[in-house]
């Protein structure tokens, strides 16, 4: 295992960092009324209580014939059709020893206690029906209230709305939903080496220059998490410029997110700049990739400083900033549950930090490892479809069961 450098400050376990960070994440004031159509990804600000039961009445789950089972004493019997009930209309009480032609979603007529699907019936020339299989009471009937009971909390405050939730809300008649307001987030990158794509062609890039990749994935991640993002671009590695940028950003935003400049090199100006305006905690979190992370306050805004290395920035965002932003919106369960999966690779070298390895599910149902796990190699996050959460000091042998966290959940 890689040993701690003598005299090095002890690193903070990820769970402690997350608990501290979430402790600062008080839910934002302000509720918005949003059309259910536009509420995907938003967080419900109030319990949603149903004023009705769903389905509102017993109805057919098949196209076929509704009947009273007791009317059918043997299968040679032929029963006349006494009414026709398409979806959207209500039938009348079922006349004795008759069947009702019925369609999927149509209410069961009073007196009927089963539906026979049309494939199990012969329709005779005069339109009457012979039932080919003995029905059981209740068959092919969807019961009133089997989905939602009147008065039930269909969706709880703090639920993050996904397409299925929107459908469920609509099924109880909600066209407008009360949701948490979006966090206003200011984003900027630090680093004099950074060049925005489009401003300098690849063949003209000066020595030492790199394109600003973090800005692109951080903005997209923030938008996915429901934030209103102000992209403030690249701030030069100068104390005063950094102070000015932070002060402006704090005026109109709930959160300031930066990438780079949180290490302790002399070109890292974030720390003194934030300290001059508010306060800053600089954490060395015992994770890999990752490690440097800053949380602080600039006036009334939260300040979050992410590492500059792209994969560190990406992973740290997913592990810490994602739950933080969700909690600001009142999400009750921001954590993602890992899945137990078999590793199809070896990871023989333990690290004292908790590692988040970029892996990908294979056709055999196991996990393959991306060969280069360097914190600068963004290809690993593209090739991979998730992370293996490997505990401190942990080695992995092929066949071991590991904790897998899919990107699909972290990026939702
Ligand atoms: P820093 O945390 O500022 O010391 O940066 C660590 C490493 O990440 C350096 O190699 C930087 O060039 C790189 N880096 C910092 N910011 C970005 C960015 N926005 N996009 C791509 N790489 C970055
Ligand atoms: Mg830098």
Image (cartoon, rainbow, N blue to C red):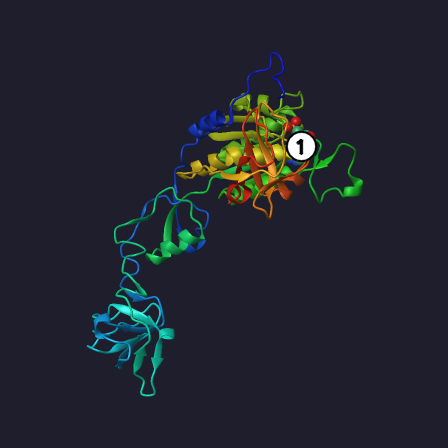
Q: On the rendered image, what quadrant is the N terminus found in?
A: top right
Q: Is residue 230 above or below residue 131?
A: above
Q: Is residue 230 visible?
A: yes
User: Could you say where residue 153 lies in the image, as x and y percent from the top left?
Assistant: 30, 48
Q: Along the line of sight, which residue is nearer the eye, 90 or 384?
A: 384
Q: Label 1 neighbourhood size at 10 Å, few (<14), some (14-19), many (20+)?
A: some
- Picture quadrant where residue 9 is located: top right
Furthest residue in direction top, as rendered: 7
Q: Is residue 155 above or below residue 344?
A: below
Left or right, 75 with respect to 359, comes to left
- Picture quadrant where residue 74 is located: bottom left
Provide the residue designation for mark 1: 374
Give the total of numbered labels: 1
Q: Is residue 107 visible?
A: no
Q: Along the line of sight, which residue is nearer the eye, 31 or 94?
A: 94
User: Could you say where residue 360 lies in the image, as x and y percent from the top left?
Assistant: 60, 42
User: Could you say where residue 56 lies in the image, as x and y percent from the top left?
Assistant: 28, 61
């Amino acid at each position: 295992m890689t040993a701690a450098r003598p005299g090095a400050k002890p690193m903070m376990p990820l769970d402690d960092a997350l608990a501290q960070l979430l402790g600062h994440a008080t839910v934002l004031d302000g509720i918005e009324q949003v059309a259910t159509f536009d509420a995907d990804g938003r967080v419900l600000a109030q319990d949603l209580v149903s004023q009705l039961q769903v389905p509102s009445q017993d109805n057919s789950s098949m196209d076929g014939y509704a009947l009273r089972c007791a009317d059918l004493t043997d299968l040679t019997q032929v029963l006349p059709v006494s009414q026709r009930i398409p979806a959207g209309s209500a039938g009348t009480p079922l006349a004795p020893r008759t069947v009702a032609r019925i369609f999927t979603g149509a209410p069961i007529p009073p007196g009927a206690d089963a539906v026979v699907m049309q494939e199990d019936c012969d329709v005779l020339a005069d339109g009457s029906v012979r039932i080919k299989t003995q029905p059981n009471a209740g068959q092919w009937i969807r019961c009133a209230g089997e989905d939602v009971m009147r008065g039930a909390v269909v969706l709880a405050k703090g639920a993050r709305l996904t397409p299925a939730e929107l459908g469920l809300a609509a099924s109880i008649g909600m066209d407008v939903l009360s949701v948490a307001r979006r966090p206003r987030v200011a984003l900027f990158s630090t680093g004099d080496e950074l060049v925005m794509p489009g401003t300098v062609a690849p063949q003209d890039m000066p020595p030492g220059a790199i394109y600003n990749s973090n800005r692109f994935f951080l903005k997209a991640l923030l938008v996915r998490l429901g934030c209103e993002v102000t992209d403030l671009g690249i701030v030069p590695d100068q104390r005063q410029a950094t102070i000015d940028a932070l002060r402006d950003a704090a005026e109109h935003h709930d959160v300031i997110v930066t990438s780079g400049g949180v290490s302790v090199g002399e070109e890292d100006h974030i720390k003194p700049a934030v300290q001059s305006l508010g306060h800053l905690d600089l954490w060395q979190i015992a994770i890999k990739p990752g490690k440097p992370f800053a949380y602080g306050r600039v006036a009334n805004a939260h300040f979050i400083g992410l590492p500059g290395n792209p994969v560190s920035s990406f992973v740290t965002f997913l592990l810490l900033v994602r739950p933080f932003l969700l909690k600001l919106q009142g999400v009750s369960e921001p954590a993602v549950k890992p899945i137990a999966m078999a590793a199809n690779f070896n990871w023989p070298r333990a690290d004292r930090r908790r590692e988040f390895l970029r892996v990908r599910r294979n056709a055999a149902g196991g996990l393959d490892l991306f060969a280069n796990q360097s914190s600068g190699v963004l290809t690993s996050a593209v090739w991979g479809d998730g992370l293996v959460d490997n505990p401190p000091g942990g080695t992995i042998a092929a066949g071991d069961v590991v904790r897998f966290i899919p990107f699909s959940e972290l990026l939702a």
